[in-house]
Amino acid sequence: MKIKIIFIDIDGTLFNDNHCLTEFNKEMCITAQKQGIIVVINTGRITTNAISIAKQINAHKFKSFVVANNGVHIYSFKDKKLIFNGNINNDFAKTVYRWVDNKGFKCQFYTEDGSFVNRLGENSSYWADVMQAKYTVLNDIDDLNSDIARIVIIAKTITSQVASQELINEFNEKFSHLDIKEYHPGIYEITLPKMSKGYGVKYICDLLGISASEAMAFGDSYNDQWLMQAVGHPVAMDNSVEIIKKLSNYICQSNNENGVGNMIRKHILK
């Protein structure tokens, strides 16, 4: 198969379950770039952390790109800056905060280098540590002092499709200028319209004049749905959730078995 560009998710995909990049996966990503194939990290992780991880595969030496915060930020190593920034205005974010907080739901506000939460959470605190990110528990709405890349609502009490659709409808009525996606029951992401990992793919491919039919992507989780749909060669990890497998043309070995590296070596490298 002829592939010109590869987009790779991090957690559950490029990294193993210990959040580590193996030497084999690293070597295959670097070898692909040496052969002229562009390799792009495409992740939900915050931007500063995603850039740091991209450097581990030498993406900076090949003047590649990073898609971070689920497509809200696109960084160019050639330009040494964000070439796309889809942040939510701070005032809009505060309005969403009030709406979510009044409902008693937990919410996380992601920025370029960290996150704000309306209440302390074990899972959000854990991931902040993993990403070496700033982590701020909001005591007052005015503490939300940064523009926000995306907002994640955690509403575990919503378990039925009817209740979920009612929440989405209410949101759309109040915030027509924003977009809401349901990843799975009780988990929602809010961004500016059209923001997704798939948008990052389209933006970079259009910029470089590459057809989606010449692009490959690796993913494993719910936020990779739009990534899979954006490329001609979607690859699901063996550890992927079922919807990602259904959207993919290929299933490779798991993230703990160097699935990304093995797929690149067997099917991409010359």
Image (tube, rainbow, N blue to C red):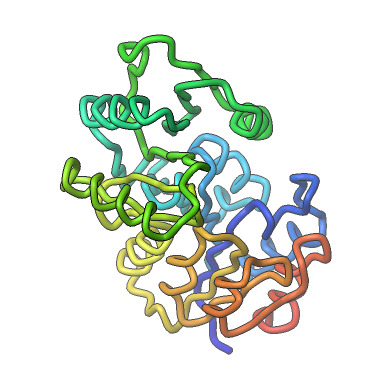
Q: Position of residue 89 (x, y in %)?
A: 23, 31
Left or right, 140 with reference to 232: left
Q: Quadrant of the N terminus?
A: bottom right
Foreground residue, 158 or 15? 158
Q: Quadrant of residue 246?
A: bottom right
| Res 191 quadrant in image | top left
Task: Estimate the x, y position of residue 197 in percent, counting from the top left.
Answer: 43, 58
Closer to us: 19 or 94: 94
Which of the image's four quarters has the C terminus? bottom right
Decide if residue 60 is on the left or right side of residue 73.
right
Q: Is residue 136 visible?
A: yes
Q: Residue at x 40, y 78 (%)?
A: 212
Residue at the farthest bottom position? 1
Q: Position of residue 265 (x, y in %)?
A: 74, 76
Query: So how many labels did they put on this image?
Result: 0
How far from the left and from the top, in percent, is residue 266? 74, 82
- Which residue does the image show at 63% across and 44% down from the upper left? 53
